[in-house]
Amino acid sequence: MKKEYSVTRRPQRPPGHPGEILKEDVLPALGLSVSEAARQLRISRQTLHRILKGSHGITPEMAVRLGKFCGNGPGLWLRMQQSYDLWKANEKLSEELRHIPAHHAPQLAS
């Protein structure tokens, strides 16, 4: 089983949108055009273009499609989208978060 490591501090730059990974790495490595990739994923070219542009996120359904298409499962695609979304939310709310107190819940017994 692979071990996952948690990030203890926030990275200095935002994680890439999963669409960027598809556009810059996956499609060129597979030698596929956007049209052909969309056909194989069974989605419209417009939908894939929106994802590649970063204007649309990876939904659970799209993660299942991409996981099958790339052979790496849906979890990776959802985690990439979640990292991207959390970064953006933290940036958007950074000033407001300064005024919210942090409470630490007691550890629950196992």
Image (cartoon, rainbow, N blue to C red):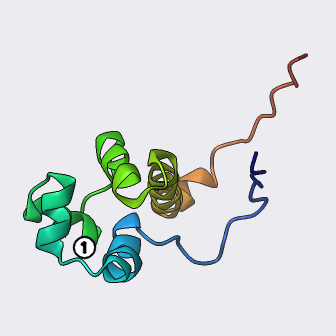
Q: Which x, y percent locates residue 49? A: 17, 69
Number of marks: 1
In the rendered view, would you say 81 is above or below 60?
below
Residue at image x 49%, y 58%? Answer: 80
Mark 1 residue type: Lys
In the foreground, 88 or 65: 65
Q: Position of residue 66 (x, y in %)?
A: 35, 54
* 53 with respect to 98 (left or right): left
Residue drawn at the location 63% of the way across and 49% of the way down: 99
Specify whether 62 is left or right of 84.
left
Residue 15 appears at what percent x and percent y? Answer: 52, 70
Which quadrant holds residue 50?
bottom left
Specify the quadrant that holds the C terminus. Answer: top right
Residue under numbered circle 1: 53
Foreground: 3 or 7?
3
**Residue at the farthest top position:** 109
The residue shown at (36%, 44%) is: 64
Image height of 85 relative to 75, above or below: below
Circle 1 — which element? helix
Residue at point 25%, 59% (across, down): 56
Query: Crowding near pointer 1: few (<14 within 10 Å), some, many (20+)?
Result: some
Q: Could you say where residue 35 lies in the image, as x and y percent from the top left?
A: 11, 71
The residue lying toward the viewer, choosing from 108 and 69, is 69
Residue 7, image quadrant: bottom right
Location of the N terminus (image quadrant): top right
